Amino acid sequence: MKVNMITKDGGSYWFAKYSNFRIASSSDNYRLTVSGYSGNSTGDGLAHHNNRQFTTKDADNDDAPYNCAFARDAGSWFGSCTGSNLNGHFRKENIAGLWWKGYSNFLRYAEMKFRRRS
Ligand SMILES: [Ca+2]
């Protein structure tokens, strides 16, 4: 799995590649397994999300005492909310913004690409 990102000022094109990526079935609330980071970004932005179930506004599966999907206005494998917010809002420069862990600003663009391991 590869995440491609462009920083807010457009000056940096980052990638984060993961050699191991798996999403469990609905019975396990689409739990994420992710490891094997390499790339040129500010670090392993998905480490916090490893082994977390997916949370949406109508399905709170995170560890926070509230629903992280409302705080971040997005769905994700939140855990305790901290970590990256790749489903965050473009142009929202607050907790609901498009953000990658370790970066002190916001992203202009992010995409996640998947390829079956051969
Ligand atoms: Ca919660």
Image (tube, grey):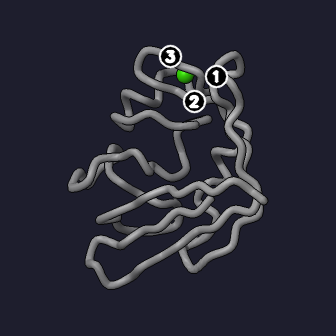
Q: Quadrant of ligand 1?
A: top right
Q: Quadrant of residue 52?
A: top right
Please give the label number shown on residue 79: none
Q: Look at 71% across and 50% down and name the residue there.
A: 21
Q: Is residue 10 above or below residue 2?
A: below
Estimate the spatial distance between the alpha carbons at disc 1 and disc 3, rounded to whole Å.
Answer: 9 Å
Q: Position of residue 55 (x, y in %)?
A: 52, 27
Which residue is disc 1 drawn over? 29
Q: Quadrant of residue 42?
A: bottom right
Q: Position of residue 96 (x, y in %)?
A: 33, 44
Badge 2 crowding class, 10 Å Cα cut-off, few under 14, some 14 to 19, many 20 or more, is: many
Amino acid type at image mark 1:
Asn
Q: Earlier in the sequence, mark 1 or mark 3?
A: 1
Report the side of 117 relative to 5 (left or right).
Answer: right
Which one is nearer the viewer's eye here, 112 or 55? 112
Q: Look at 57% across and 27% down and name the residue there.
A: 64
Q: Earlier in the sequence, mark 2 or mark 3?
A: 2
- Secondary structure at badge 2 equals loop
Quadrant location of the C terminus in the rendered image:
bottom right
Which residue is disc 3 drawn over? 59
Q: Are marks 1 and 3 in contact (CB under 8 Å)?
A: yes
Query: How many numbered markers are drawn?
Result: 3
Q: Are marks 2 and 3 in contact (CB under 8 Å)?
A: yes
Q: Quadrant of residue 57?
A: top left
Which residue is disc 2 drawn over? 54
Q: Look at 44% across and 33% down and name the residue there.
A: 75
Report the side of 108 relative to 63 (left or right).
Answer: left
Amino acid type at image mark 2:
Phe
Amino acid type at image mark 3:
Ala
Q: Position of residue 1 (x, y in %)?
A: 63, 58
